Image (cartoon, helix red, strand yellow):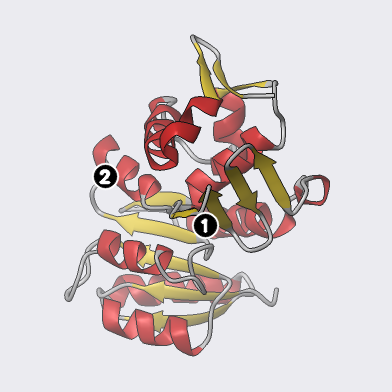
Amino acid sequence: MNARILVVEDEPDIQELIRYHLDQAGFQVETAGDGNAALHALRRRRPSLLVLDLMLPDRSGTELCREIRSDPDLKDLPIIMVTARSDEVDRLVGFELGADDYVAKPFSPRELVLRVRAVLRRTSAAPEAADIPELLQHGDLSLDTARHHCEVGSRSVDLTAKEFQLLRMLMSRPGRVLSRERLLDEVWGPDVTVTLRTIDTHMKRLREKLGDAGSLITTIRGVGYRFAE
């Protein structure tokens, strides 16, 4: 495989364990021990995917994830977060910041390899992308899928990767009800274990960011969401 993986982990033993198993799986692997080294590596040469430890010596993984998502050249970079903390709050924070998957320590190296492959498959294949127009528009709301840019009127709206994917799914299927299960499956993938509340949290923030245009997204109680026709 030609995919390049950047592993950001400050514990040498765990860093080497991850590097070894990804290398054995056929990936090109680069490593970094802290946030500053990671940013330098990312801006020198963008990888195919980032494996990011949540606890780093110079900054938190969530802070680094936020910086990456605010960088126009990196905001759609696939990210798998790795952490010793496994409670739901941490997972939700990671996903809200745009992480694509989440692995808790101690983890099986084989599981991590499978998750890397699954995220790369989801983010690179984009099976429905060819059927979605580059520009989706409804009234003042426009979504440029090619440029990964959202506007309401003349106002630019800064969306996380997950928020953008959710809005794209809804806008590309106006009038159709999309269940929470389907949104989770298509945006997060079938192999990611998160609760349905994750969707509701993202939708709430998405509507807030869209302002008045947020009313175009209707909640169908007990089912999911629908975008206006």
The quarter holding residue 65 reads bottom left
**Nearer-the-camera pick, 132 or 65:** 132
| Numbered circle sitting on residue 222 | none
Q: Residue at x 41, y 81 (%)?
A: 31
| Residues at circles 2 and 1 in contact by the CB criterion of under 8 Å | no
Three-letter amino acid code at the position of disc 1: Arg
Position of 223 compared to 172: left or right? left
- Pick whichever of labels 2 and 1 is earlier in the sequence: 2
Please give the residue where the numbered disc 1 appears in the rendered image.
110
Element assignment for label 1: helix
Q: Which residue is mark 2?
A: 90
As drawn, 15 above or below 149: below
66 lies above or below 220: below
Question: Residue type at mark 2?
Answer: Asp
Residue 206, x across and y down, in percent: 43, 38
Name the residue rendered at 63%, 63% in the picture. 147
Q: Percent from the top left, x then y, of residue 123?
A: 63, 56
Q: Is residue 16 left or right of residue 186?
A: left
Closer-to-camera residue (30/170): 170
Is residue 25 shown to the viewer in this render?
yes
SS of the residue under disc 2: helix
